[in-house]
Image (cartoon, grey):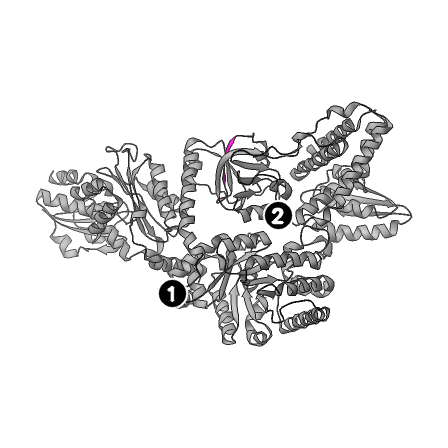
């Protein structure tokens, strides 16, 4: 019996190790011979060998045929057909897309110095300047004892023993979690690969080699094969072969001393293709100042660990980063998502200054972290964090989170071959409750499907995944899995204020069904004598617009509502924000959307229900007056933003929030809303005076226009007068390009009007060494005054004051006073007097 | 001499007012009377009327952008200079007027 199945290869990373090992696993369940032929290249592979499949170099769009020949060909063909249609297209779902190009805006100094910049995606903010420390798979070398009994039967035994040892160590890996288990599985498929084993054995039996020589020969063969692949991802997988080969070598001869990473003795930026969590944990984190990773997922465990430890990390960096020599100085800018190689002196100086600025900001904000979030007039609003792991939750509480407003449980379900057990889940939920120490934690039940696929669920491909089979809509089809999750969550409720939140609710019927489900689980727990909190709060996500219109019907059935602003916005405005052509239409500041939000919060409060917000809008600091106007009980955001969020909340009163929301609701466009918010921030901002001692620099070491401008802008940044110093700097330079702002008399007045300036400011600098502001100037400048004006401030009092100051600067005696002022407070006094 | 002047610059934050101040200072030094209108971030201030233009001997525009309500000056001799020039070398402007 034989069957042929045609298919077009669907994955953009090609037929790499992960889909190949999944295919091979299935093929090995059948007695039939299974061959994959790539019709474009003619390459043929044994379908039961991962390496053979990978070696076909099959690319996205290649036409292929699976030939099945044998007694169970029909059954095999049916299963493989299903695999090709339903599982294979999702094999790459959680891999980063190759060649990610991030925004591309870099600080001016990098452009000016033509610095070598690599772009990536910042996943853990911070800045590091240190020698590169490449971590890669070990090089294979022949142990001294390796050649003794080449070609003999003992060598065959040695090889088989080593393979067995390795296989059983990989097989025990499912006890590990997530990424680690996944890697072990990929490695297992190599060790058990028919072709790989045959290749190793024939090295000994046919070529008379020792085990070590055979391993090296086999590793070289496959890495060379993979190394010529068109797909960058495939080339990277050569690393897996080398990794497995060196482990076989260790199992055969014992691990050599240099197998262990040399201990770090000084600060480094670790550069690697990817770093397994165990590799990462093996490094002395005290010296790890940053991570630059070429192929790591934003949600990989290493990244989550780095974030929880506050180690700056950029992922998706081009492969060139792997060629950095050990000890070469690099700058890792995980604020903007760039890596600068061979940074010149000015670039290093820039980043040293940036680091000091970051430290000053952190210090300023830290006082807010430990405070309860309250408005200027004492109204309470809870500031909580979004988290997806215990580590992230722990970090969030250190950052000042007053609870976890959204714990994404789907992370536990991804990156693995089967759903987590109840106990596995309970361990994570319980650890989170312990970290919370009595603070509330809202666990969202599984939100999977749609764009977030999980291969083992075998979900079908959908034309419209966001409008399809996802979250609560698929629970009934996976009853055991959801039972286990609800049991684990209820058990965790015995340990503190755990709450359960259901995603993608659209109707009363769904809520009733979930309540009944949870009640059934509670009865089971009672019957089994297992502890839980019977009053555990049950809430729903508000992300489908229909919910906004039935709050009155839902309120009796739920304890709380949490607005998921991302999905709610895209469903409400019918805009897919992943679609570049319509992305511009997506804005959570759209006035109609704000009206919807008011309907939701008013409705919930009218019925005595708590309402929070956990979407991206909830992390937007300029939107604080809207939160207050809406009367949200809680906002939940990524934890690094928490201190700044608390600071901003303290700057507004609830009544001001009401007034600003009313104004926003009357706007016609999202841009008008944003302008209104910027204006509100400008007029209200902490009552920051136009000038104060913290934005005055005397005896500056900088004596070049570009450096001085940046120093002044950084002073504004450190003092919380702008959150986007790069944009303020650009705005100053745009003005500078119309004509230089040197006004003679040794004075320059660079200035800008920009929405990036939150609080209009006059910053002042005296260089230790006077310098020419522009080519052709006669007098060197000994005084630079930066006038940074908020865009929305037109016609306001600040401009009148600056006009007055400008006139005053034309007078010799006033300039002499500024030049001679012995301390920042004297400068403030002189300027303030002039502005009276 | 009776002089009317208008100052204006691209951002309108500072140069407009500095130039106005310089022109007023220099005019005094040369013994002229002057009225300076500023067209800056605060809008038009110290606005010059048609009657004031008609009564003046000469107008000075120290500007980096087009002057608003320019038709007021249709019948008067206008000396146009850069706003920077008015700030850095106001005296030179008045010396030129004397010629």
In this rendering, do the residues under marks 2 and 1 share a single chain? Answer: yes
Q: Calculate the distance from the C-alpha at mark 2 to the C-alpha at mark 1.
A: 40 Å
Question: Are there few (<14), some (14-19), or many (20+) residues within 10 Å of tag 1?
Answer: some
Give the camera-side residue of A482 and A772.
A482
Against A107, residue A634 (above or below) is below
Q: Earlier in the sequence, mark 2 or mark 1?
A: 2
Residue A346 spot, x, y in % from top left:
41, 33
Identify the chain of the residue marked 2, using the numbered disc in the image: A
Residue B73: image x %, image y %? Answer: 19, 51
Residue segment shown in magenta: A326-336
Q: Can residue A672 be spotted in the picture?
A: no
Q: Would you name the residue on which mark 2 appears?
A: A301
Query: Callout 2 environment at 10 Å: few (<14), some (14 to 19), or many (20+)?
Result: many
Tell me what residue is drawn at x 58 percent, y 46 percent.
Answer: A303
Tell me the element at label 1.
Answer: loop
Q: Most extreme residue toward the left, as rendered?
A: B31
- Residue at the disc numbered 1: A653
């Amino acid at each position: 019996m034989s069957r042929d199945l045609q298919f077009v290869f669907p994955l953009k990373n090609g037929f790499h190790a992960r889909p190949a090992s999944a295919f091979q696993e299935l093929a090995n369940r059948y007695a039939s011979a299974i061959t994959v032929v790539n019709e474009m290249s003619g390459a043929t592979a044994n379908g039961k060998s991962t390496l053979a499949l990978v070696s076909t170099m099959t690319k996205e769009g290649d036409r292929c045929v699976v030939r099945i020949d044998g007694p169970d060909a029909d059954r095999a063909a049916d299963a493989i057909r299903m695999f090709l249609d339903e599982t294979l297209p999702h094999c790459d779902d959680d891999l980063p897309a190759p060649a990610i190009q991030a925004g591309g805006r870099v600080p001016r100094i990098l452009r000016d110095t033509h610095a070598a910049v690599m772009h990536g995606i910042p996943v853990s903010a911070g800045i590091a300047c240190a020698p590169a420390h490449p971590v890669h798979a070990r090089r294979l070398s022949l142990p001294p004892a390796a050649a003794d009994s080449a070609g003999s039967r003992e060598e065959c035994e040695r090889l088989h023993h080593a393979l067995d040892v390795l296989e059983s160590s990989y097989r025990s890996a499912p006890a590990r979690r997530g990424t680690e288990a996944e890697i072990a599985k990929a490695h297992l498929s190599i060790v058990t690969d028919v072709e790989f084993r045959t290749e190793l054995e024939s090295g000994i039996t046919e070529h008379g080699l020792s085990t070590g020589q055979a391993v090296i020969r086999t590793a070289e063969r496959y890495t060379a094969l993979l190394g010529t692949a068109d797909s960058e991802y495939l080339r990277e997988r050569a690393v897996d072969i080398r990794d497995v080969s060196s482990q076989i070598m260790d199992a055969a001869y014992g691990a050599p001393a240099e197998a262990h990473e040399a201990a770090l003795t000084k600060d480094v930026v670790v550069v690697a293709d990817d770093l397994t969590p165990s590799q990462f944990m093996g490094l002395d984190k005290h010296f790890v100042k940053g991570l630059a990773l070429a192929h790591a997922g934003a949600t990989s465990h290493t990244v989550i660990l780095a974030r929880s430890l506050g180690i700056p990390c950029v992922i998706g960096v081009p492969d060139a980063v792997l060629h950095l020599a050990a000890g070469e100085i690099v700058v890792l800018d995980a604020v903007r998502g760039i890596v600068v190689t061979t940074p010149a002196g000015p670039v290093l100086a820039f980043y040293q200054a940036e680091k000091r600025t970051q430290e000053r900001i952190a210090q300023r904000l830290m006082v807010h972290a430990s405070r309860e979030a309250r408005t200027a007039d004492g109204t309470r609003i809870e500031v909580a964090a979004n988290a997806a792991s215990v580590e992230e939750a722990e970090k969030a509480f250190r950052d000042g989170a007053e609870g976890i407003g959204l714990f994404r449980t789907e992370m536990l379900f991804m990156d693995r071959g089967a759903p987590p057990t109840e106990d596995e889940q309970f361990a994570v939920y319980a650890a989170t409750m312990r970290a919370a120490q009595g603070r509330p934690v809202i666990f969202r039940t599984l939100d999977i499907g749609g764009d977030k696929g999980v291969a083992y669920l075998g979900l079908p491909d959908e034309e419209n995944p966001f409008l399809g089979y996802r979250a609560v809509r698929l629970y009934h089809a996976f009853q055991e899995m959801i039972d286990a999750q609800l049991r684990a969550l209820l058990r965790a409720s015995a340990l503190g204020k755990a709450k359960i939140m259901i995603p993608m609710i659209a109707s009363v019927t769904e809520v009733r069904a979930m309540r009944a489900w949870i009640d059934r689980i509670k009865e089971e727990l009672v019957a089994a004598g297992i502890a839980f909190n019977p009053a555990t709060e049950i809430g729903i996500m508000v992300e489908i617009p229909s919910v906004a219109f039935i709050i009155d019907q839902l309120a009796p059935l739920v304890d709380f509502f949490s607005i998921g602003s991302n999905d709610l916005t895209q469903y409400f405005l019918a805009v897919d924000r992943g679609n570049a052509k319509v992305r511009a239409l997506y804005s959570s500041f759209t006035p109609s959307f704000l009206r919807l939000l008011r309907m939701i919060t008013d409705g919930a409060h009218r019925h005595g229900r708590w309402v929070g917000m956990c979407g991206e809008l909830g992390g937007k600091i300029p939107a604080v007056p809207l939160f207050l106007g809406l009367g949200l009980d809680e906002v939940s955001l990524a934890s690094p933003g928490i201190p700044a969020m608390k600071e901003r909340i303290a700057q507004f009163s609830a009544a001001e929030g009401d007034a600003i929301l009313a104004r926003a609701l009357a706007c016609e466009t999202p841009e008008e809303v944003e302008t209104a918010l910027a204006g509100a921030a400008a007029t209200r901002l902490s009552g920051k005076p136009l000038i104060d001692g913290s934005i005055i620099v005397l005896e500056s070491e900088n004596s070049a226009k570009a450096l001085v401008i940046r120093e002044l802008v950084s002073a504004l940044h450190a003092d919380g007068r702008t959150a986007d110093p790069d944009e303020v700097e650009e705005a100053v330079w745009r003005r500078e390009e119309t004509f230089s702002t040197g006004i003679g008399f040794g004075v320059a007045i660079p200035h800008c009007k920009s929405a990036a300036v939150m609080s209009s400011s006059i910053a002042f600098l005296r260089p230790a060494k006077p310098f020419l502001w522009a080519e052709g100037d006669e007098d060197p400048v000994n005084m630079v005054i930066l006038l940074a004006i908020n865009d929305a401030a037109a016609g306001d009092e600040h401009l009148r004051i600056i006009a007055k100051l400008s006139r005053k600067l034309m007078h010799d005696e006033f300039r002499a006073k500024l030049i001679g002022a012995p301390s920042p407070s004297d400068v403030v006094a002189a300027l303030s007097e002039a502005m009276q | 001499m009776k002089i009317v002047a208008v100052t204006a610059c691209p951002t309108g934050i500072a140069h407009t007012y500095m130039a106005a101040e310089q022109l007023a200072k220099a005019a005094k030094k040369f013994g002229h009377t002057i009225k300076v209108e500023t067209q800056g971030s605060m809008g038009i201030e110290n606005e010059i009327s048609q009657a004031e233009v008609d009564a003046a001997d000469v107008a000075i525009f120290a500007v980096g952008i087009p002057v608003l309500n320019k038709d007021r000056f249709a019948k008067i001799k206008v000396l146009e200079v850069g706003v920077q020039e008015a700030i850095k070398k106001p005296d030179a402007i008045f010396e030129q007027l004397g010629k």
